[in-house]
Image (tube, rainbow, N blue to C red):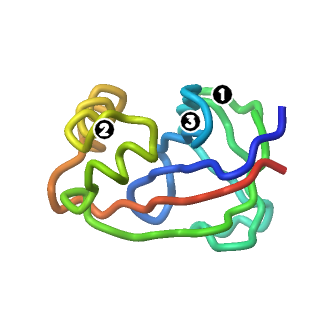
Amino acid sequence: MYMKDWHMVYIGDLPKRAMAIPKKSGERFIFSTVYHPSGRKKLQIGNRYTIQEPKSKMPIFGIKVTKIRQMVAKNVTDKIANKLGYRDASHWRKKWNTYFAGKDKIENRTEIFLVDFVLV
């Protein structure tokens, strides 16, 4: 099924820990690695990437990045969290920290990227 206007959140330059959430449904994809054919390490607008599920070498789907917003985690408001499919910002933080406990845990100063993309 082809859907437009998906969101992804990740920490740092390489999205080793990321959540992809479609805007228009409650379905949530969680994945650990995003690959670009050229081997670039940063996501860039207009580029195509392959998504893999955690602990797997098999690609799930391809994406094309349409928008990237950089911010610190404490600036994720209830409105942003709601667009990402959560009730509010604290619900988003709680879910992220449940999925990615340990070194990838969200702190107030953690730099994150919100990425909009379409499936290709």
Residue for point 71% across, 32% down: 57
User: Disc 1 versus disc 3: distance between alpha carbons?
Assistant: 10 Å
In primary-sequence order, the first of circles 2 and 3 is: 3
Residue for point 15% across, 56% down: 108
User: Disc 2 versus disc 3: distance between alpha carbons?
Assistant: 16 Å
Q: Residue 54: x and y, percent?
A: 56, 29
- The relative height of residue 9 versus residue 20 in the rendered view (above or below) is below
- Amino acid on which disc 3 is placed: Phe
- The relative height of residue 84 versus residue 91 in the rendered view (above or below) is below
User: Disc 1 versus disc 2: distance between alpha carbons?
Assistant: 25 Å
Secondary structure under the numbered disc 2 in the rendered image = helix
For the residue pair 38 and 91, the one nearer the viewer reads as 91
For the residue pair 85 and 44, the one nearer the viewer reads as 85
In primary-sequence order, the first of circles 1 and 3 is: 3
Residue under label 3, please give it.
31
Task: Tell me which corner region of the image, top left, top right, bottom left or bottom right, holds residue 73.
Answer: bottom left
Secondary structure under the numbered disc 3 in the rendered image = strand
Task: Tell me which corner region of the image, top left, top right, bottom left or bottom right, holds residue 44.
Answer: bottom right
* In-image side of 119 versus 22 (left or right): right
Residue under label 1, please give it.
56
Q: Residue 85: x and y, percent?
A: 45, 36
Residue for point 83% across, 31% down: 1
- Amino acid on which disc 1 is placed: Ser
Secondary structure under the numbered disc 1 in the rendered image = loop
Which numbered disc, 1 or 2, marks the residue closer to the eye? 2
Task: Tell me if residue 54 can be seen.
Answer: no
Q: Are marks 1 and 3 in contact (CB under 8 Å)?
A: no
Q: Which mark is residue 75?
A: none
- Amino acid on which disc 2 is placed: Trp
Q: Which mark is residue 92?
A: 2
